[in-house]
Amino acid sequence: MNHDNSAALQPMEDEDGDRISSLPLEIIISILCCLDIRYAVRTSALARSWRHHWKLLPCLCVDRFLPELQDALTPDNCSLCPVGLGWMNKVHHVLSSLQGPVLVFKLSHYFRSYQSPKLQSLLDLLLERAGVQLQSLCLFSHLEPVFVHLPFFHSLKVLQLHACNVILPTGFSGFKRLITLDFEKVYISHDDFHFLIRTSNNLTTFRNLGFVTANLPLSVNLSCPLLRHLHFEISESIEKVSVVSAPCLEEAHICIKKLTGSQSEKFASVTLGLLTSVANVSSLKLDCHVLQSLSLVTLPFNFTFPRLRCLKLFWGITTMDLLYDTFLRLLRSMPFLEKLHLVIGLWPTNWNRNKTRELIGWKQEGLPCLDQSLKRVTISIHACDPFMTSITVAKFFLLNAKVLKLMKVQYLYQLYGASAMSKELHGADVTSSDAIVVFLDLMGNVI
Amino acid sequence: MITLISSDKRKFHVLEEVANQSLTIRDVIEDRRGRRRADRIILVTNINSKIPEKVIVYWLRHFLMPEEIAHASMSHKKAEKLKKWEAKFFDTDIDTLNDLILAADSLDIPSLFDGACEKVSDILKNRSAEEVGEISKIENEFTHEEEEEEIPSENAWVWRNEFA
């Protein structure tokens, strides 16, 4: 806007002194908040007025995994180097130097299990310093699981734990304000887990990966009135998952921990239980393992996702015999699907070549999403595709999707097969009159 | 269409939907709804004209890409593009950043405020005090003793690049 006049701009005010220091203190603090605590403390050497600014910080973040630190590390000390001896004391010192209430606390490092007591003393100090005002607590242990007696931070909004063995505080009555719960490789007892979920009524984001329980497999019932994003990994420790009620759920990403073939059978009921209760989501990501266990037998016949607009399917290493049928069934259950993203991984070596050929001429009737809504299809090819199954899939959509606007084919691995594919697709029958096919390389550039 | 007037009396015409990204302006418009057209003029007194230009460019970019789209699962690439664009947008001198922060603060544009703060913090980190002093013109009035001994020893560990 008004670019021509920019030469006539009024000169900037003449004083070109120190303008950062003249910013209001709150703003300086919000700038320092973006920094790891080390860099924030370093600013104390900038000028006398800056000397104690860092002590006003409402947050303490120490992250071993800052990208700029990664560069400074040699491969030797980079590998699994546990926390140094004085490290906890330093954090302890900084924490006790902070003057204001601490709202955000984040530690990310290679902890050893035997360091749990020291970590616990930090948390106890945190409770003393921050008390009920703490809003965000993140603990990442990258080496061994640590034991944590979680203090009762009443106003906690964000809780992120990675490789922790958690025990809820005594007298715990629920994190009433918790919005984000992010667990990865967390060990927690059944009762504690259920109690935590049941009492967190304001939860909007829930991510649970690599969940482990020591005792019997767990059956999880989620009933979260405000839940919007769910990312759930189903593992051996989980027997059954069902989303009893989540009226606000928008995005669900469900995957199964990678397993050998024989084990995956017993997850069928799990995935089904989860799927039937996420019928209201508008965006869904599914792993191929989930798809595999959703065989024709287990998917209820007239089951639909009435609001689903976006689907991302990770489609890869699996026995594919049932997959095409299941895939059609899945398409049928999504009458309003607009965007489909297929991520195609490694194909099984025993894939029946004839079956692929057979399917090339595939014409399907009576799939509402293909007739009315499906506008964009993206096919990402992650590995080499010796049987050109991706061509089959692409042709299928060109032939059947009546309102298709854009098809993207992206090669994420190498361009092998791209020319064959483009030749094949140029000769294909395209039903939609304004469909465009684009080929992209790894960087998203048009080939 | 509303008109913003900067402290050096330049006028900027912006679509209401675009300017709505500033919570302050949105509130003002809301207050004045239904009144005369002359009221659609908003004085932005504390910033000079270079900044509204930048702010409007920022608004336009974000207006073209509403946040819901950026966050939906299917468009990570779009979000990445926006990120790249923002990196370029914020790659400017520290005075401009300073003004952007002030403008974003007074106009209440959270994403712009956070972005600019992050950029300034990027400038502060991984640089020695002298380097930062040069860039930001922060005057270092420490005595020699303070500089040599007291401050480094106070929190010695933050100066070493060890794992903490």
Image: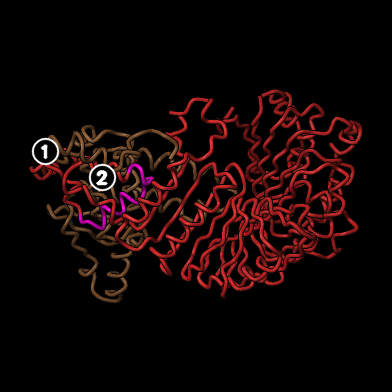
Q: Which residue is mark 1?
A: B143
Q: Which residues are magenta?
A: A24-39
Mark count: 2
Image vertical order of residue A267 relative to residue A109, above or below = below
**Marked residue chain, label 2:** B
Image vertical order of residue A82 relative to residue B102, above or below = above
Question: Where residue B97 is drawn, which disc sits there?
Answer: 2
- In which quadrant is the N terminus of chain B drawn? bottom left
Chain assigned red: A
Chain assigned brown: B
Q: What residue lies at 86% left-to-right and 63% top-to-bottom?
A: A301
Residue A173 on image: x %, y %: 57, 75
Residue A319 or A128: which is nearer the viewer?
A128
Side (left or right) of B64 relative to A365 = left
Residue A380 falls inside the magenta stretch: no
Amino acid type for the residue under numbered disc 2: Leu
Residue A22 or A289: which is nearer the viewer?
A22
Disc 2 secondary structure class: helix
Residue B160 or A316: which is nearer the viewer?
B160
What kind of colouring is applied to the model shown?
Answer: by chain
SS assignment for the magenta stretch, majority: helix
Side (left or right) of A219 relative to A103 = right
Residue A305 on image: x %, y %: 73, 62
Q: Nearer the viewer, mark 2 or mark 1?
A: 1
Amino acid type for the residue under numbered disc 1: Thr
Disc 1 secondary structure class: loop
Residue A114 on image: x %, y %: 58, 47
Residues at discs 2 and 1 both on one chain? yes
Q: What residue lies at 54% left-to-right and 41% top-to-bottom?
A: A110
